Image (tube, rainbow, N blue to C red):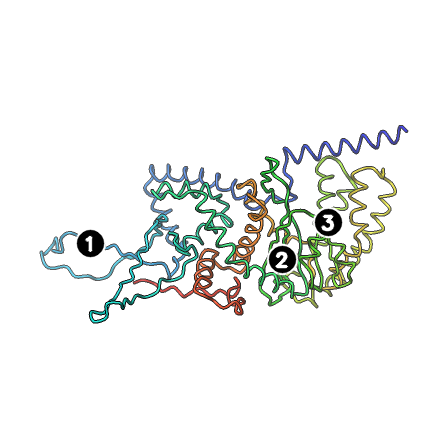
Amino acid sequence: MLAAERAENERLRQIIKELQRHRFGRRAESLPVDQLLLGLEEAEQIEAEGFAAEDTADTAKREARARKRRANRGSLPAHLPRIEQIIDIPDKICPCCKGMLHVMGEDRSERLDIVPAQFRVIVTRRPKYACRSCEEVVVQAPAPPRLVEGGIPTEATVAHVLVSKYADHLPLYRQAQIYARQGVNLDRSTLADWVGKAAFLLRPIHERLFERLKASGKLFADETTAPVLDPGRGRTKTGQLFAYARDDRPWGGIAPPGVAYHYAPDRKAEQPLRHLQGFVGILQVDGYAGYRALAERNAVSLAFCWAHVRRRFYELAQSGPAPIATEALQRIAELYKIENEIRGRSPEERRTARQERSRPIIDTLQPWLREKLALVSQKSKLAEAIRYPLSRWAGLGRFLDDGRVEIDSNVVERSIRPIALNRKNALFAGSDGGGEHWATIASLVETAKLNGVDPYAYLADVITRIVAGHPQSQLDDLLPWAYAPAPLKAVA
């Protein structure tokens, strides 16, 4: 009884440490790049302030730094418009002989300028024509189709609202405040109406995007919470956004990367079953049991994520002395070291390297975990961390036999981060329909970003083409990876 009480106390202490670290400490295993950059920004600003003070006091240092900046500065993009300013001398008479001076050359420099975003009004005029002989005849060009019939926004304006909301994480009420500063008073409900109409228009592209992803032989899957307002109860309910991603670039695949989100009101296993109906191949996931129903159909093989295994031992090692957890982390780190070396190689090369170098580590890790499990209390957090990989061992080892499979599901977890940022800023979706709009537009925005396409230019073009009557049979031409922006010409 005493041993059981001590084991339970140790387990509760561990839980308290985890909660304290979750509340007050850093949860990520590595320092996120964006957080690191925030710290560097402050240091660089302080350094620049010091240089400015030195430049003011010492002319030689100011000139030396100016020469260094000119030597290291790259050329500005050629497609940007150039506005030339000529700074000339007021008098072209030689100060020596009083003859006329002639141009022998010039110094040319370029600086980056910015014009803040401005609203403008597109005035469409449609003249009416009548016949002097036939009074009944009136001829006029038909009005061009619009996304919002009778409304004021252009398709580009709606695209800007969508990108601001789903890519830059600005809720509609904040956008309305920004617009009001320029004297354009748009109610938040008006912006919401535009978003709803655009989401309805873009839904077929979202569906086609997911069809193309499901046709792949390998996908990543993950899910995250999506708080949704529940007016009947006066509070929010917890919906789910499921993410299904494809990224074959680590092994040189030619299929373009993409991600499709699907909103669901719950996290039941029937949701991924419904979403992935017809999918055949390898699904890389975390430990969520809802995906196991897919594997039972024999059409889907599950590959599990070593990052989730590592995370459990990391939490134990961060909370205090934990020799078993620390050694587990070291063994897993060897696997990741090998993965870093073979990233970008062909599937055959990756498989060969894994069989020669990673398999021995995996083969010795499993008996070591079983040995350590027998030495610790079965109710402890360490025992839970050890049982997690042991219960998923076949799926964790699947990457050894297939060079297309990654060691973890970080690809899709990176696609979840924008959803979390949007959730943090918007707090919740207004309804289940709002959650579906979120999934539709975020899918296109994030897929465009994965393919190096400007989401604003893409959405503005696609909405315009659909409104103009783009054939439903040619939706593949509207997918983000098929978008080809018109070449921009330099302005002399």
Q: From this viewpoint, is residue 416 visible?
A: yes
| Distance in Å between CA atoms under marks 3 and 1 | 71 Å
At a point 66% along the width and 52% down the height, the residue shown is: 222
For residue 88, which numbered disc appears in the image?
Answer: 1
Q: Quadrant of residue 22?
A: top right
Expressed as whole percent of the image width and height from the top left, the position of residue 234 reads 59, 35
Of mark 2 and mark 3, the one earlier in the sequence is: 2
Q: From this viewpoint, is residue 407 visible?
A: no
Position of the C terminus, as image quadrant, is bottom left
For residue 288, which numbered disc appears in the image?
Answer: 3
The residue where tag 2 is placed is: 245
Residue 20 appears left or right of 388: left
Q: Secondary structure at mark 3?
A: loop
- The residue most toward the bottom is 133
Total marks shown come to: 3
* 351 w.r.t. 228: above or below: below
Residue 450 appears left or right of 135: right
| Distance in Å between CA atoms under marks 2 and 3 | 16 Å
| Category of crowding for the residue at label 1, using alpha-carbon neighbours closer than 10 angstroms: few (below 14), some (14–19), many (at least 20) | few
Type of amino acid at the residue the image marks with label 2: Ala
Type of amino acid at the residue the image marks with label 3: Tyr
Q: Secondary structure at mark 1?
A: loop
- The residue most toward the top is 2
Callout 3 touching callout 1 (CB < 8 Å): no
